[in-house]
Amino acid sequence: MSLSRSLVSALLAGALAFTASAQQKELTLKDAVLKAGTDLAPQRLSGLQWIPNTDTYCFVKDSLLLKGGAGKMADVPVLSLKEVNDGLKRKEAIKRLPPVTWTGANLFYFDVDSITYQYDVSKKAMLSHMALPSNAEHQDHDALYTQTAYTLGNDLYIHTTRQREHTLRVTNDGADGIINGASTVHRNEYGVEKGTFWSPNGDLLAFYRLDETMVTPYQLEDISTKPSTFNSIRYPMAGQTSHHATIGVFDTRTKKTVFLNTGEPKDQYLTNLAWAPDQKSFFVVHLNRATDHLRVVQYDVATGKAMKELFEEKDAKWLEPTHSMQFLKSDPDKYLWWSQRDGFPHLYLYSLSKGLVRQLTTGNWVVKRVIGLDAKEANLFVEGTGLIDPKDPKGATETQLYRVEIASGKTTRLTEEAGTHTGALNTNGRMLLDTWSSQSVPGKVDLRETASGKPLKNLLTSTNPLKDHKAGTIELFSIPGENGDRLNARLIKPSGFDASRKYPVLFYVYNGPHVQLITNSFLGGASHWMLQAAERGYLVFTVDGHGSDNRGRDFEQAIHRQLGTVEVKDQLHGVAYLKDLPYVDDKRMAVHGWSFGGFMTTSLMVKAPGTFQVGVAGGPVMDWSMYEVMYTERYMDTPQENPEGYATSALPDKCDKLQGDLLLIHGGIDDVVLPEHSYAFIKNSVSKGVQLDFFVYPGHPHNVRGKDRLHLMTKVLDHIDRVIQPKP
């Protein structure tokens, strides 16, 4: 196989290369893991944000909160870490400035422990604003920080400073299996990120009530106690009884709660919650458990009764609404709605009274985030991919900033530079803060005007944090995949790469929904440990196959009812591509992945036996019938509806197909992919006389973080090294 001339040119221009003459230090695995987010990360402006209703912004640098602006305005100190610690008077000083939220040009708030502090810039005064119980969870401030909702146990409370400072108890029925105001509804699928929702003026608080008493408990062993104890979680598995969610609305003035009459079936998904601008009604997206039909319903908060069904959407495979409607302040009858009904996630303008007004964004690209609107709400600003051509999908690796005219839908790209851009819009919509990187640019922050996208000022240009380390090249390109689509791929070569040699390959795989591993950003989306692995003598290879993020509906839905089938074929297309390269040793190939990537690692080892000589599967799903309802049934339907699909994707009964060395790793208290997944594969392996290795991280949940992550990556790479025996 050969790459096109233009692709090779782009590849060479974009590849992140480090010349041998500049290399002084070996990149150790310890540094690659523990310093990836600090010393070896590009410089950044922490806490960068606009100050409301001004043309000034703030950020943290060298333990100082600074304020800056357009033109020649110098950065001005606002608050230092020392001043905060002097005001806190804690026994143990905090080590970094906490995140701040501005509510006006001179007023901001921040939280330390369970206390909220107010700082008045004009008076240089720091005050303790409100104190919550030390064990309070799920804190949610209203827009002006006059009230904070929080949970204790499974009940919901409000601490208010209105009129007088006091606490309101919102619910009294919290118990094992009855949870109020928490963020665990629908296991955080379908855009659920929190459990409480303040009305615009803070008079009303909507909240989730979750009843999971009908869900079978699952026991996770806690070995930190003597003797060990068991913590019970409610874990609804595919095809089994799921939890029931309802929505209450608490009035802080009357101290009464009204529950919305959301009706049957009780195991429906209630998501994308939104307040009407006048606070008289509340909007809920009803998604059926089969996830192929949604309805947007308006409720009267005074009575809880449904007022109107605004519209519905259907899909033959699945729907996944993740964004609430966003109302226009200038015309409260109109709102923005996300949908991928035309094949790509796009924005639509709707009217409460008249329905669909127009589709705002169109084309083969993905709208990823709404940044905001200008003061007159004539223009909408969004982040989105570049144009995606199935034959040249590199646009999917980009994130660009766009301006969209509300009246016409005319869309203008504001960022000319290739890369991954994140935007922040000031209140009047005239300026954008653009934080971005690419393969050739470690990191920049530019201030841009929104009329043209022209840079007005550079706030930061990061140096390459790896310039003094020995590191190789990172190449992004595309390869042929299943169904004739091309797939984005990444190849990391060691420094001193010699094309006359034969190199072993380490595949890093995920290839599941919602994840994109390959981006035009610093390191091309790779982790630092992959560079270190390359220095051991590997080519480190990754493919974003069908099912992965930011390629549009059809690309993702190719996996429907057959998880692990198309994805395995895509990864094997990657193997075929590599076998055509003269410097690849296809007799020494390894594969590693975590979570869905652990499922893919094991799938490749048993469904393509002999292709990989060694695999390390972390936190692997082994049988989708044992994974959670919300995620699994979206892609696979239920085991009762799709027995063949579940049987094909299940791995424990295929353990006897294993060729090569397989290591399974699992967190001891993994509440996402339960440890019984690994146990099921091991049990079948023992029964069939199949040898493999298994390692548990006691006390760790689904991911191994902190200092123990170094132990994890050492375990992974040492295990692969023993089989592959790479040569630097």
Image (spheres, rainbow, N blue to C red):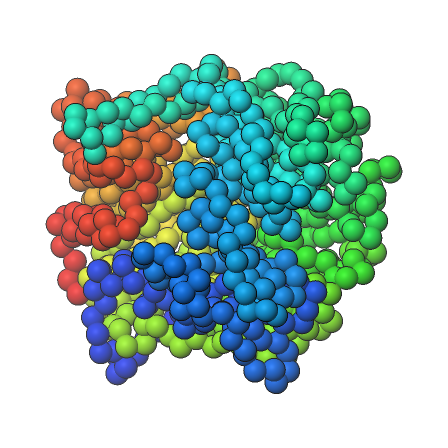
As displayed, is residue 198 above or below residue 49?
above
Q: Quadrant of the N terminus?
A: bottom left
Q: On the image, which quarter does residue 535 sit in? A: bottom left
Where residue 606 appears, x then y in whole percent? 28, 33
Q: Is residue 494 visible?
A: yes
Where residue 101 appears, x then y in whole percent? 56, 57
As displayed, is residue 678 above or below residue 543?
above
Front residue of this view, candidates 177 and 536: 177
The reply, left or right, for residue 643 in relation to residue 316 is left
As displayed, is residue 24 above or below residue 536?
below
Q: Is residue 339 visible?
A: no
Q: Quadrant of the C terminus?
A: bottom left
Where residue 143 appears, x then y in whole percent? 64, 49
Which residue shows up at 26% across the image and 83% down it? Answer: 21
Which residue shows up at 35% across the image and 72% down it? Answer: 465
The reply, left or right, for residue 303 in relation to residue 688 is right
